[in-house]
Image (cartoon, rainbow, N blue to C red):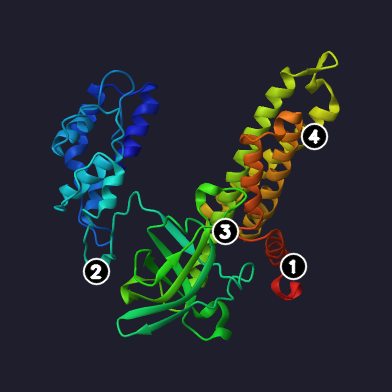
Amino acid sequence: MTDKEIFDAIRVRRGRPLAQADVDAINAILGPVAAPIPSMDEPAWISNARSKIGRAEIVGPKHNNWIAAGWARLGVKWFNDDETPWCAAFVCAALEAAGIRSPRTPRARGFASGATVAPCDARLGAIGLVVGLVFAIALTEPRGGSDAANLRLRIERVGDEYVINGEKTSISAADQADACVVFGRTGPVDSAAHGVTALLVPTDVPGLTRNRFDCHGQRAIGRGSLFFENVRVPVSHRLGDENKGFVQVMQGFDFSRALIGLQVLAVARVALEEAWAYVAQREAFGKPLSAFQGVSHPLADFDTQVEAARLLCLQALWLKDRGLPHSAQAAMCKWWAPKLAYDAVHQCLLSFGHGGYDRGPMEQRLRDVLGFQIGDGTAQIMKTIVARARAGRRAVGV
């Protein structure tokens, strides 16, 4: 059993939170057993961190002494409790237990300074700690939106480097990303999806410029364009195999599409809760607005659909977790949830009457969810994916 399984079993058996004495006793027993075992599957610092699964805060005024002592081990004198977020300190401790110098910081952003990169055997793969950095996915181009594989940005290998020329557009976090994953063509144009390579490109390299769009919504995301003019990165910055980058990124879309569904539905849910509260207390003609079916029934309709769409998103993720086909469900999430969220928020805005038309959270939500009807695949593309899954690619003809 792992530490966590043992702790969970004890919690269930006792039926109450563990006290300090319980934690100390269990840690004393687990200490020798849970020592990190060298493995060819993961670096030593990961093994060390894994061995500490189950260590947790104590509910109430007392503190887990193991966590509290961890601050002192890192030379941090102003914390001595288990209430202060200790995730960064824990990673520092795991690194140093494996003989790797850490930033010795109580804040996750401290890792962004580049003070530490955990080296490991080449057979295990490069392990880097990147906390507090912003990354962008640079896939879309001016000539390729829904036709995502129609890439023109060129990546050419010259010795031990790749040289990049071209443009990416409609990229989230374009103006603020510290690095971007760039997909470009290394094969011939007619190779379509099978001639695309992915590179990790820092945004401060010579030859890379960028701008920011003035968007209707999601302004914090910083959507914009990236321009590459003879940008050079080492061959070691390639992610995955050459000419297989597009296939790799497409495998992640089924996951992100279900998450986007949950994201926009959460916005719709908040809007519905606020609308229900408003129509229940706002009166007209001597009655609450909710007493009028013309007001309450549209909200009830959207409430029902939002709940159903949420369950569809969860089903897609459930299928993914079990390694079962879920592309159709993910596509359903992506085309239905953003449109449903937009329509639901729109109805909520109308429920507030003239007050809903003012600048404020409701109209911002309307603008924010609208963009998700475009990004990560339009409704037309998503419905085509569903049709392929149900009728077969040959029968659909695309």
> Which one is in front, 34 or 105?
105
Q: In the figure, 283 relative to 330: above or below?
A: above
Give me the residue at 83% from left, 13% from top. Answer: 286
**What is the CA distance from the residue labelled 2 to the residue labelled 3?**
31 Å
Secondary element at tag 1: helix
Q: Earlier in the sequence, mark 1 or mark 3?
A: 3
Residue 390 percent across, percent down from the top left = 72, 64
Left or right relative to 207: residue 351: right
**What is the CA distance from the residue labelled 3 to the residue labelled 4?**
31 Å
**What is the CA distance from the residue labelled 4 to the residue labelled 1?**
34 Å
Give me the residue at 51% from left, 72% from top. Answer: 167
Residue 122 badge: 2
**What is the CA distance from the residue labelled 1 to the residue labelled 3?**
19 Å
Secondary element at tag 3: helix
Q: Earlier in the sequence, mark 4 or mark 2?
A: 2
4 and 1 marks in contact (CB < 8 Å): no
Q: Is disc 1 surrounded by few (<14), some (14 to 19) or many (20+) residues within 10 Å?
A: few
**What is the CA distance from the residue labelled 1 to the residue labelled 2?**
45 Å
Q: Which residue is mark 4?
A: 298
Give me the residue at 52% from left, 86% from top. Answer: 188
Q: Quadrant location of residue 3?
A: top left
Secondary element at tag 4: helix
Q: In the figure, 170 relative to 10: above or below?
A: below
Residue 285 percent across, percent down from the top left = 86, 16
Residue 254 badge: 3
The N terminus - image quarter: top left
Three-letter code for the amino acid on which mark 1 is drawn = Ala
Residue 161 percent across, percent down from the top left = 32, 79
1 and 3 marks in contact (CB < 8 Å): no
